[in-house]
Amino acid sequence: MKILLVDPPYERLQNVKTTPNYPLGLAYISAFLNKKGHQTIYLNLDWDPRLPAANPFSYRDLMNRYNLFLKETATDSRHPIWRDFENVLKLYKPNMVGISTSTIKVKSAFRLLEIIKRVDERIVTVLGGHHAQVFAKEILENVKELDFVILGEGEQTILELVNALERSPQADLHVIEGLVHKDNNCTVFFNSRRPLIDDLNTLPFPDHCYYYSGAKFVRIPIMAVMASRGCPYSCNYCSTNNIWQRRVRMRSPRTFVEEIKVSIKNQKERFLSFYDDCFTLNKKWLLEFCDIMIKEKVQINWQCITGVNLLEEAVFRKIVQAGCRKINLGIESGSERILKLANKNIDLDTVRSIFRLAKKYNISTAAYIMIGFPTETEYDIRLTQRIIKEIHPNWVYCNVLIPLPGTPFYDLCLGLKLLDSAKAWRGDTVKNIVMNFTNVMSDDEFLRLVDETFTICYRINRNIVNLIKRTPLKQYMVTPSLIFSDLKRTVQYIRDRNA
């Protein structure tokens, strides 16, 4: 069977790119289906190498971008991305299209489904991802263009679905674990949930994804890898455990190193992002991985995501030797009260200590910050501003809380009547990208604090020392052409900012 897997557009519809993103979920499914004899390609519709990097400098900037996204996902939008997708369907002629979506992207996923069935109603449509986990029933009942929803990990479930449909259109679908489907009367059936994959080493290395340009598929170099799946924590704002169920599974260090070697063969930058939720969670595993990287002289630079409570000086020493150049740390708030409310089990003294260690070992740091938690006061936000200035990371990712369906904060906001869940399946709870869920501050007061916090982060991100720190000198020496492409993106960004 010919299968097209699609990551829906979001930032591309806003004409910006806030951070490099290489979604891996569909890349693993694509590789798995291809290994099993099917013809599969993975199309990343949110990728456009011409887009300038963007850094929010006001709440209005974010809101204007999101309003543009809403405009371009409406059925009357004439954005070229929709025409390109229609051309892809006609060129590739898939029997099935699988789409993975988050809550923030679901409106563009629905637009893709409309286009698919308009081009050829015989194409089987499948939806997966975090948003589909929560609203499978509502979406199947209301979106006539959707045929199936997959819960949990998708590899084995979609394979069994493809094989069943190839055997017979009337195949018994009730036996396929992890599948949600409907009959001709739109009665929705939930099959039993599929157990998570025990041994991740059995999965093939992820496929490349492609973008569509000039009537052809252009391969995107692999820029991200994962050594594990799952997170043992349960932060109240995070939806990841809707799929992983707080169960962490790790591949062997040897297998992961082999994937790294394969991934950098056709990549100019020789830089990889490790997308694990907590890369330094298992110290024994980490030390074995680093020892292999050092012994075999795998010459790459890499970054990872981890928690401040999962780092210590011995870990810093080892990961630097193994090529780590950047760590991304979830701080979220400078208020102990808000951290407890968010079930974020970190200590601010530990935060300060870890950022000092990062400076000692010359590792670039990025801090994830969030404001707008339920019951958050001006004092709480001032504490967050203070911790940002105190730790002074090399980059700050600052976000305003969006209560994601399936999380405790979503339920809390429903209870406080801060959300309308009537059309939540359609993504309508996200009326804008900056909303006030504090329930204790006026909108004007909250938005003023948002702008203040963005300004602090923007100044850190554009600090000349941090710009130099983030400059990929080794990458430029290996591939000088990167200098000109980065300069071009920077100039375009400055023009857009001034406009």
Image (spheres, rainbow, N blue to C red):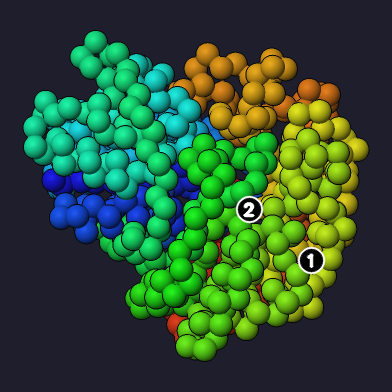
Residue beneath disc 2: 55
The answer to whether residue 89 shows anywhere in this view is: no
Horizontal side of 62 relative to 478 (left or right) equals right
Q: Is residue 405 above or below residue 480?
A: above
Q: Position of residue 347 (x, y in %)?
A: 83, 53
Q: Position of residue 405 (x, y in %)?
A: 56, 29
Depth check, mark 2 against mark 1: the one in front is: 1
Q: Position of residue 468 (x, y in %)?
A: 68, 75
Amino acid found under the numbered disc labelled 2: Asn
Q: Position of residue 172 (x, y in %)?
A: 17, 27
Residue ID at (45%, 32%): 133
Under circle 1, the secondary element is helix
Amino acid found under the numbered disc labelled 1: Ile
Q: CA distance from mark 2 to mark 1?
A: 25 Å
Horizontal side of 296 relative to 38 (left or right) equals right
Q: Nearer the viewer, residue 98 or 34?
A: 34
Q: Which mark is residue 354?
A: 1
Residue ID at (74%, 38%): 342
**Which quadrant of the structure image shows residue 450?**
top right
**Which quadrant of the structure image shows residue 283?**
bottom right
Horizontal side of 464 relative to 21 (left or right) equals right
Q: Is residue 289 above or below residue 178?
A: below
Q: Nearer the viewer, residue 215 or 339?
A: 339
- Give yes or no for contact between labels 2 and 1 (Cβ–Cβ under 8 Å): no
